[in-house]
Image (cartoon, helix red, strand yellow):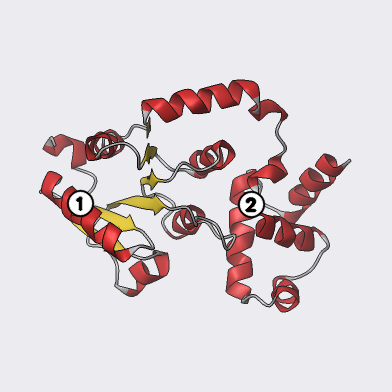
Amino acid sequence: MAESDTDHVTNIVILDTHPVLRKGLAVLLQENFTNMRVTEAKNVVELQQAGPEPGPSLFIVVINSDVEEDGISPVFELKAAYPEAPVILYGEEPKPELVISYFKSGINGYVSKHKDLAELITCVNMVCAGKRYVNAEYMDFLFGYLIDNYKTSKKRDLLTPRQYEIARLLIQGLSTSSIAEKTGLHISTISTFKTAIFQKLGIDNVLKLKQILESEEN
């Protein structure tokens, strides 16, 4: 890897809920990026508890089959904490709508776990050079999907069932604390949901959320 490609990035941080897999990926990446520090953590909370990274970081978020099963995406959580950091997704193939919303939120690359390590290394090089990257096969699939479906899809389809439930409560005028009490979730969790919902739909307030949901239900 050329030194000039990584002048602005000194660390690669891997976020993955599976400890054995992320440690193995960390070893492989360190072998290929000897001029960079490779670290790993379960999630954003664990990373922040470990202390700040010494210098600019590129994040690799490993998405597994359980991504967003609790309604909270690690991608949106990461971008909320580190809005300027470059982010690569690596792993299972999520729904096209979700990948599109991820790129709208500011991620820089996506590589399927079914590709070999060389593809991920290429992606890291491209992102470090300030470019976006999607592996070719998925790009073809995504392009076909956009032609056939995306213009007619509803924005609410970007939300998980849990996120949609929270969105419905938000447009009813309930406060964060009231929603937390009604759902049995922590107030901080509701705030994270709200941030993810706004980022997915490309909005910044509850009024716009209400307009979207009500227009799509009529």
Instruction: Left or right? Give the position of 120 relative to 216.
Output: left
Q: Residue at x 79, y 47 (%)?
A: 213
What type is the residue that disc 2 sits on? Phe
Q: Residue at x 72, y 79 (%)?
A: 181
Between 17 and 45, which is closer to the camera in this rendering? 17
Q: CA distance from mark 1 to mark 2?
A: 31 Å
Q: Residue at x 33, y 51 (%)?
A: 59
| Label 2 SS | helix
| Label 1 SS | loop
Answer above or below: position of 1 versus 47. above
Q: Residue at x 55, y 22 (%)?
A: 144
Q: Earlier in the sequence, mark 1 or mark 2?
A: 1
Instruction: Left or right? Give the position of 64 relative to 18.
Output: right
Please give the residue where the numbered disc 1 appears in the rendered image.
10
Instruction: Left or right? Give the position of 110 relative to 122.
Output: right
Q: Residues within 10 Å of mark 1 (few under 14, many from 20)?
A: some
Answer above or below: position of 11 versus 202. below
Please give the residue where the numbered disc 2 appears in the rendered image.
198
Where does residue 99 sit, x and y in percent of width and height? 51, 40
